[in-house]
Amino acid sequence: MSSYLIDEILELTKDHKSRPFFEKALRELGEPVLAEEFGELKYQIQTRQVHNPAKYLTALLKKRLNQIKGKEKQNPAGPKKKINTYFEETQLTLFSSFRPVKEEGEVDQGKMAVPYGKEIIPWATFISSSFFTLSTNKAKSDRVQAKFRSLDGEVSVIPLFRGRIKPNGQERGVLTAEHAKILAAIEGLWVDQDCPRNKYPSGAVTCFCYVSIRELARALNWKTFGGKDLTWLTDMVYDLKTKPYYLDLTSLNLKNINGYGFSLLGDVELAEGKKRGQPETVLKVKFSTPLSVQLLDRHAVSRPKELPHIHGELAFLIRLFIEPILIGLDGAEYNKTLTDLIKELSLPAAGWHKDKSGRKSVFGKAIKELNKQKTADGKPIIVSIEKGLYDWMLTAKLGGEEKCLELHTPGPAEQTK
């Protein structure tokens, strides 16, 4: 894999005399970092910001190498910290990278030069808890305020229309935490297949994978399931294509773009047959442009394969929300009142929201499951409900490495749909 990545770099830069430097960068920075900076180079070429690819990539890598040297001088005995998340450099690059690009020219069907590790699910940092709701939300569309972060420390709060491809368009339904779990499981299957992708001369990219519905059910940790369960699961996958979003970008003053409408999956094809005498449904799933770009450029947080095993929808949304925050706090404690957490998660209106003891009861049940969760690098998520001055508070932090208990997630026949 390593030599293949170097070969890709040399093919693009045409700078074969720099092979020793690129190989040194690979040894000292590691494959993920080298792949990230190579992805940044390709993006800048696509936007016509770079005219000397070799010089630009060399500058990026030298900056990374100097950062390592600086940290080693400050703490020579300290352990190397894992990079758990990688955001876009700026808000401008974040939203500009989602412009639709035509899939023109002869397709290059292949796999990522350095695929993600088989033990993790790469969750795009762009896709936050704001993208999903609870199954109790019966609205066909709604509008929430979504936060988007970039490496420069900037945070944009953007109106996100869920369930519409345009603000005044047809209502098509809002995706739930159940859909989010299924998306996570599909991304895990994509990683298992060594991250296949299509590239086009126009610059368009698309990730895709083949999904056996039975295999998907097992990835969700369903122990038992029948025909109705598998049909329900197939429909839920298709929802990821048909239930869209619209981002109102007018406040960012981006050139030539005021809004962006998209779905999480770009296309879903179905084939049915038999395997070992049993009915078999296989889907070819293509990820949408925003999701494909994020994954291929490694703008993703690593999450464990057990992520889609979480049973409770509220527990899943809380995890999507707090995990990136906890990783950034590096062991420090995070606190949020339950009233504010309800607003952060954009939860659908319910009577318990205004009842102090009701909030404690509902969130208390959710965190019982969260306390059995761990991050991709083995750190347990420690969550509790503590008494605050005016309201109960969610308190969370990451602990040391600890083996996580295996959870059972029932099939939809065991759940209330």
Image: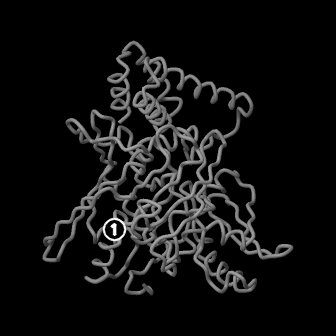
Q: Quadrant of residue 325?
A: bottom right
Compared across the picture, whether 322 is left or right of 107 comes to: right
Asked if residue 74 is positioned above or below residue 128 in the image, the reply reads above
Which one is in front, 213 or 43? 43
Q: Position of residue 184 (x, y in %)?
A: 43, 62
Taking the spot 27% from the left edge, 37% from the top edge, the residue there is 200
Q: Position of residue 234 (x, y in %)?
A: 29, 72
Compared across the picture, whether 111 is left or right of 54 comes to: left
Q: Position of residue 106 (x, y in %)?
A: 20, 36
Asked if residue 296 is positioned above or below residue 64 in the image, the reply reads below
Taking the view exactly as shown, the residue that stands out farthest to the top is 17
Taking the spot 66% from the left edge, 69% from the top edge, the residue there is 343
Q: Which residue is mark 1?
A: 237
How was this image coloured? Answer: one colour
Asked if residue 320 is positioned above or below residue 83 in the image, the reply reads below
Compared across the picture, whether 191 is left or right of 275 comes to: right
Which one is in front, 18 or 103? 103
